[in-house]
Image (cartoon, rainbow, N blue to C red):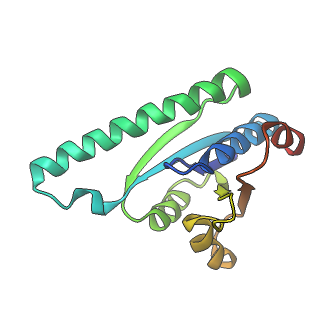
Amino acid sequence: MRKFLVVLDDSRECLNAMRFAAMRAAKTGGGVTILSVIPPDEFNHWIGVADLMRAEARERIEVHFEVFAKWMRDRQNVDPELVIREGEAVDQILAQVEADPMIGVLVLGAGAEGKGPGPLVAQLSRSAGDLPIPITIVPGNLSKEKLEEIT
C-alpha cells in the first residue's frame, strides 16, 4: 500500500495538506503517515527540564494528531499513523522517507497570504530533483470543495 507522508506542525497550511493526503489515500486505497518533528533547539536546558519539555511536546503532538486522525477515520475511512522524530525538519522528513519504503508521496502545504511558500516547501523544492519520491504542494488557500474536486 502506497502511503502519503504529511507533516504535522503549527502552520496553518498544514490543514490543507492533511486534507489532501487523506482524500487521496481514501480514493487510491493508500495510507497516511503523519510526521511531526520536534526541533532540537527546544531542549537546550538541563537534562531534567529537557526531558519534561520533550514529554510535553510529544503530548501536544499526540493531541493535535488525534484531531486529524479522527477526521480521517470518520470522514475518509483512513487510519493514519503518527511518527514523531527529533531533529531538523528536512533531515527528519528525508530520514522517514528512507526508513519507510511504502511512502510514495510527500504532501506539503504552501503558505497563503503572499508570505511565500513556507520554509519546508522552500527548502525541499530546492533539492526536489534529488528526492526519492515526488512532492505534492497543496496551496493553503484552496477551499474544502476545491480539494474534494481535485482529489
Image height check: is 36 above or below 30? below
Residues 15 and 31: in front is 15
Q: Residue at the spot x=73%, y=44% of the render?
A: 20
Where residue 92 appears, as percent x and y from the top left, is 45, 61
Direction top: furthest residue: 74
Residues 30 and 82: in front is 82
Q: Quadrant of the C terminus?
A: top right
Image height check: is 9 above or below 97? above
Direction right: furthest residue: 149
Where residue 56 appears, as percent x and y from the top left, is 28, 39
Image height check: is 80 above or below 43? above
Q: Residue at the spot x=18%, y=51% of the render?
A: 50
Quarter of the image where one finds residue 135: bottom right
Where residue 78 appears, as percent x and y from the top left, is 67, 30
Q: Quadrant of the N terminus?
A: top right
Q: Residue at the spot x=42%, y=34% of the render?
A: 62
Q: Is residue 1 something that shows in the picture?
A: no
